[in-house]
Image (spheres, helix red, strand yellow):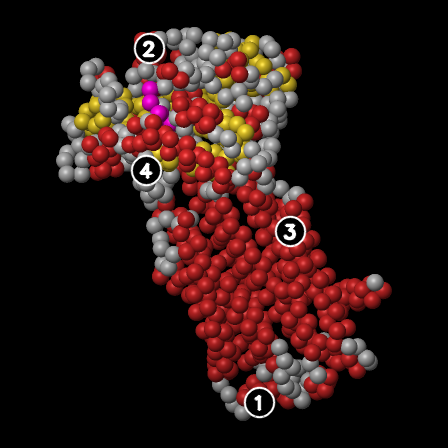
Amino acid sequence: MSGLRQDLRYAWRALSRAPAFTAIAVATLALGIGATTAIFSVLNGVVLNPLPYKDPQRIVTVWEDFGVGNQSLPAVSPLDFLDYRRLSTTFAEFAAGAGPGSGFAGGAAGVLTGSNSDPEQIVVSPVTANFFPLLGVDPVHGRQFATTDEAIGSPRVIILSNELWTRRYGGDASLVNRTIDMDGVSYQVIGVLPRGFRLHLPAETFLFRHADAWVPLRFNPQTVPARNYTLFTVFGRLKHSATLVQAQVEMDEIVRGFHRDFEEHRAGNTRVRLVPLQQDVVKNARPALMLLFIATAVVLLIACANVANLLVARSTTRRIEMAVRTALGATRGRLLRQMLTESALLAAMGGLLGLVLAMIGVSVLKELEPASLTRIDAVGLNGRVLLYAIVATLTTVVLFGLAPALHASGAYIARRLLSQRGLGGQAGGGGLRSALAVVEIALSLVLLVGAGLLLRSFVALQDVRPGFDAARVLTFGVSLVRSQYPDFPTRSAALKDIEARLRALPGVTHVGFVTQLPLTGTGPLLPYAYNEETARNWESATADRRFISPGYFAAMGTRLLAGRDFSPDDLKGYQKIIIDQSLADRAFPDLPAVGQKLQIGPNGTKDNFAEVIGVVEHMRILDLSRDVRSEIFDQLSGVPSPVQIVIRTTGDPGALSAPVHETMKAFNASLPLNALRPMSYYVERELNQARFAYLMMGLFAAVALTLAAIGIYGVMAYLVTQRTREIGIRIALGEDPMRVRRLVLLSALKILAIALPIGVIVSLGAGRILTRLTFGVGAGDPLTFVTAAALLSAVAVLASLAPAQRATRIDPIEALRAE
């Protein structure tokens, strides 16, 4: 311990005597450690941190698949759900949830009234009585749902989220067991959930979602029309004695029984997959975060190589010191320990500053709020992140400290004494520094290529036409309270009145209604058939179903490719639908789709065919980067609540917000408006993930490029110092200064010639990792590789110019006198 204290004191004095070197080394390490710690904190909070439920590793989501290439969703038939409960022995319990649009809610979900507050539209999700117990979530006030609450006709009860309870009711604990009014119906509040509770779901979940309030899921099995109406999101909790593999084997056996007993499952070749909930929730965020974590690790390696280069350069100025200490009896191990102590002190200072940078970086990342980071609220500098920062700091000591320390402690005394000022011969270290520069440049090229691919992908994504024109479109939702609009005629008349009022606003050209806007989640799935095979294998083909008003396509800027739009007369007689181009290409590849019949109900059901009256361009309703599902549009007839309103204007849609508010207030001041936003908001939100990935990768690439430039500069400056005598003699003998510059630049080009091919090979391998995050550009895109290599070469040459220029100004007399 006495020796360690002595080493630390000496290391501190040594670093204090070289403030510029210390500042550069600490800042370089802080950049690397800070970047990797910030990204690890996000990776830890979003991907690695367990979900905030009881034994979350034992909770799974249940997926039902219908044949290869067909529907695959975390969606289960209500009848299958009951059979899973009855037949399974590996699960402690199953629980289910549905959405308001499923028809199984314990009452109409929508608008809160009363409580001396303005009407408020909320999200309400129905769940089975054991749903919260399965998650291990207990109300902070009141009780859980009881099985008796699920009975049809039993009193209406509701559990509130803590956020809604606090925001609207002021956190009044006496609200429990009192009633509130929702959509004109009274509900008894029986519980309040804990603060911060959030339901984490797979991205593919439809209908069911995190809610402001929860009601019992009530349904009569006798009214479920078929086994392939997959309307429930089902969760299972494994018994402690069962494994996921055992549970999957059991579920496979249960489904084989379904194939024997039920035509729908036999025809659709149904199979069931059990997916751990944690894996299901984070699977979309994992690729981008792992990529960024690898990128920060590369930045850290470059930073270590840079600091190692600095230490090697510094060791040449301390060789007399090392030689004298050796002559006085210091062993090589003692010198090695001293050098590593200095490296450890540098790493510690860099680590502390890196933690500060990580805290700032985490705050910035939270502000960006990329859509894929569903658990961004869990991100922070906790104990695991701090442990990672400590391990990263200790690792850097080995990565950047060991090779320079071995070099500094291993040269012979005579050699060090003979080259007192570094002018008479090679003091060593040139090969090591060049090797480190090669590593820096190769790794920097990898990051530049990755950033280039993501940037080109982002630009390509922006140029994609998603099947609509979001410019100059304003959207909002409105709920027609059933107490005021109890039946179809009154609700239909209300929407016509709203449409007329909005059309009268200055600049408005089109107004349309839809049950769900694009890029806000999937709608109800509608199985369809277009030939004998798909009719026999019912639900082997499914489409996203949306209900719209005439004029919706014009308001959205969606092109009508064939046929016509809906008209009010289409609500009479034979059912009529509009399909998108992708469905038309699949169902009627050799025929005009308009006028064809599409089966939209299983064989034997009433009115199971519809006539196609129009074809529109495919709308990317879930993901801008890919076509996920075909679409079928029905005319809005039942006037559901809430309904989304789309307004196209000739000017800025934001300027229309205030007039729309006033218009709706004049129509009915008690109707809440929900999410009054331009349609471009949803497009930008979808672009956020791609923007997040390329911005982060671009930032790390810029840092790597800067560090690589510093490294090249250091190597070239060191080269000039080592060859001072040679250059002085050349100049004394009349060497052209241009040839001297060329000599130095040639050395830089030799390093590039070795580093670039290595970087290209590594980048080609790394590019395959990017394929899940890129769009419209290949992993080996030549333009990206050439641009990245050219940029890196230009930076390296520019970094070499200053040392090359300095070489031409060497005074031959001074160079020779130094000998």
Amino acid at circle 1: Ile
| Kind of residue at badge 4 | Gly
Q: Which of 243 and 154 is in front in this view?
A: 243
Placement of 52 over or under 477, stated as above or below = below
Q: Name the residue under label 4.
A: 67
State the SS at label 2.
helix
Comparing labels 2 and 3, the label whose residue is closer to the camera = 3
What amino acid is at disc 3? Tyr
CA gap, disc 1 and disc 4? 80 Å
Residue at x 25% of width, y 37% of height:
582
The residue carrying mark 1 is 729
The quadrant in which the N terminus is found is bottom right
Q: Nearer the viewer, mark 3 or mark 4?
A: 4
Q: Is residue 766 left or right of residue 592?
A: right
**Percent x, y for residue 560?**
22, 32
Badge 3 marks a residue whose secondary structure is: helix
Would you say the magenta stretch is mainly helix, strand or loop?
Answer: loop
- First in sequence: mark 1 vs mark 3: 3
Label 1 to label 3: alpha-carbon separation: 53 Å
* Residue 388, label in figure: 3
